[in-house]
Image (cartoon, rainbow, N blue to C red):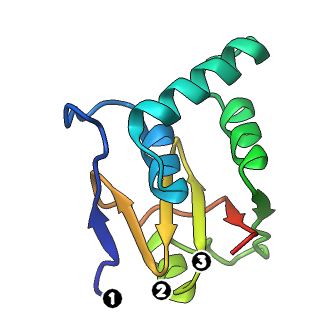
């Protein structure tokens, strides 16, 4: 299967750093890196957690119109991969949770600084007001 990955690094200094939460939210919300990082830090401060902890970015997405969906996998079956998810979801805005990473998927392509297409998807958030 051909990759549906598109290189995406909204970091203003083009740093390659552990900012997948910020990157994914930037793409999914069409906001700039500084604004998303600042918003996450403010929310994290209120919640007394770090900005990239699940509890913080989950709340941020909820406040911005995203709904979390779990993926149930029957015993003996393998989880859908990021590349497969993108292929099956050619319309809509999603943030996919994979092992130790998140990635934005918009209109059938996933956006990141590297190709995580072979990673298994555990859950996803969908922008519901589209």
Above or below, 116 relative to 110: above
- Residue 126: image x %, image y %? 69, 66
For residue 122, side relative to residue 22 (left or right): right
Q: Report the disc number at residue 1.
A: 1
Q: CA distance from mark 2 to mark 1?
A: 9 Å
Q: Is residue 30 visible?
A: yes
Residue at figure coordinates x 67%, y 78% from the top left: 77
The reply to whether dot 2 and dot 1 touch (C-beta < 8 Å) is yes
Disc 2 secondary structure class: helix
Figure label count? 3
Q: CA distance from mark 2 to mark 3?
A: 12 Å
Q: Report the disc number at residue 92.
A: 3
The quadrant where residue 74 appears: bottom right
Q: CA distance from mark 1 to mark 3?
A: 21 Å
- Residue 95: image x %, image y %? 58, 58
Earlier-in-chain disc, 2 versus 3:
2
Disc 3 secondary structure class: loop
Disc 1 secondary structure class: loop
The quadrant where residue 75 appears: bottom right
Above or below, 82 relative to 61: below
Q: Which residue bears the numbered disc 2?
A: 87
């Amino acid at each position: 299967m051909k990759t549906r990955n598109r290189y995406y690094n909204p970091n203003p200094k083009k740093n390659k750093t552990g900012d997948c939460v910020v990157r994914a939210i930037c793409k999914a919300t069409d906001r700039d890196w500084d604004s998303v990082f600042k918003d996450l830090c403010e929310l994290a401060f209120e919640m007394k957690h770090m900005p990239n902890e699940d509890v913080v970015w989950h709340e941020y997405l909820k406040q911005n119109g995203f709904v979390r969906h779990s993926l149930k996998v029957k015993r003996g079956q393998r989880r859908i991969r990021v590349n497969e998810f993108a292929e099956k979801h050619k319309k809509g805005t999603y943030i996919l949770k994979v092992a130790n990473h998140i990635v934005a998927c918009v209109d059938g392509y996933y956006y990141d600084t590297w190709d995580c297409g072979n990673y298994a998807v555990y859950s996803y958030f969908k922008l519901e007001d589209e």
